Image (tube, grey):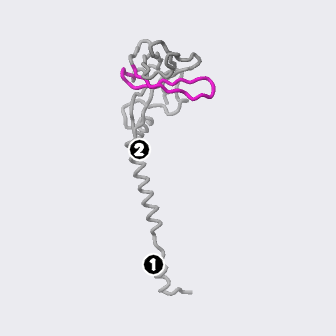
Amino acid sequence: MSIQFSRSVRSLQIDSSRLTLVGLGLGIIMMVALILWFFLARITLFEISTSATFDQNRRVQATFSPEGLSRIQPGQAALVRLSAPGDQRPIAIPAMVYDTQKGKGQVELILLEDPFGQSGIPSQLSARAEVEVEYINPAMLVMRASGKFLNRSRLPVSPQNLQTNGAPAQP
């Protein structure tokens, strides 16, 4: 059975591709936004201490790995995170790197705020220090993790790739 020519032309006129074009346009906009984010977003990299202790005068002595210590300089911004045993939320206190003692593997931090006042820091709290060492975009982070296109050593993606001394395992 054949169909009349007038009905076939009418069906072509009614069948528009607007929905397809709108979907394609939204997809292109989303893809451009993701590409811009990939190359322009700023991610902060932190070096995290293995331990931290408090002394009087709002100072913190934090111990870092040798690799992490090489990236820390006086004047860098830091956070000291205090956590209590149990379900309490950790407290983040802004700090600044005051001095690095590379021979001892320690960094001295000054607290910029004193959340406990005259009462002092409770003894049951444990602490760790996080120092901002670098800002990087996701594209550089991916290239650095893969070890390609950069003259830097490959960074481990998984903590299971680390040896006991903190150096990356050789593949």
Instruction: Please provide percent x and percent y for residue 72.
Output: 39, 22
Asked whether the viewer can see residue 37, the reply is: yes
- Secondary structure of residue under mark 2: helix
Instruction: Please provide percent x and percent y for residue 153.
Output: 41, 29
Quarter of the rendering occupied by the N terminus: bottom right
Asked where in the image residue 102 lies, by quadrant, the reply is top left
Q: Counting other residues with Cα less than 10 Å from the Cα at mark 1, is it few (<14), some (14-19), or many (20 or more)? A: few
Residue at mark 1? 13
Say the numbered circle drawn on residue 38.
2
Residue at 45 percent of width and 35 percent of height: 145
Residue at 39 percent of width and 35 percent of height: 136
Write down the region rendered in magenta.
Answer: 72-97
Q: Counting other residues with Cα less than 10 Å from the Cα at mark 2, is it few (<14), some (14-19), or many (20 or more)? A: some
- Secondary structure of residue under mark 1: helix
Residue at 37 percent of width and 21 percent of height: 73
Q: Are marks 2 and 1 in contact (CB under 8 Å)?
A: no
Examine the rendered structure and indicate whether residue 40 appears above or below residue 78: below
Asked where in the image residue 149 lies, by quadrant, the reply is top left
Instruction: Please provide percent x and percent y for residue 168.
Output: 48, 27
Amino acid type, label 2: Phe
Instruction: Give 43 or 149, whichever is nearer the viewer.
Output: 43
State the CA–CA distance, disc 2 to disc 1: 42 Å
Q: Is residue 114 magenta?
A: no
Say the numbered circle drawn on residue 110.
none
Q: Is residue 75 magenta?
A: yes
Instruction: Please provide percent x and percent y for residue 86.
Output: 63, 26
In the picture, measured across the screen, residue 165 lies left or right of residue 100, that is right
Amino acid type, label 1: Gln
Examine the rendered structure and indicate whether residue 27 appears above or below residue 8: above
Examine the rendered structure and indicate whether residue 81 appears above or below residue 103: below
Of the residues under marks 2 and 1, which one precedes in the sequence?
1
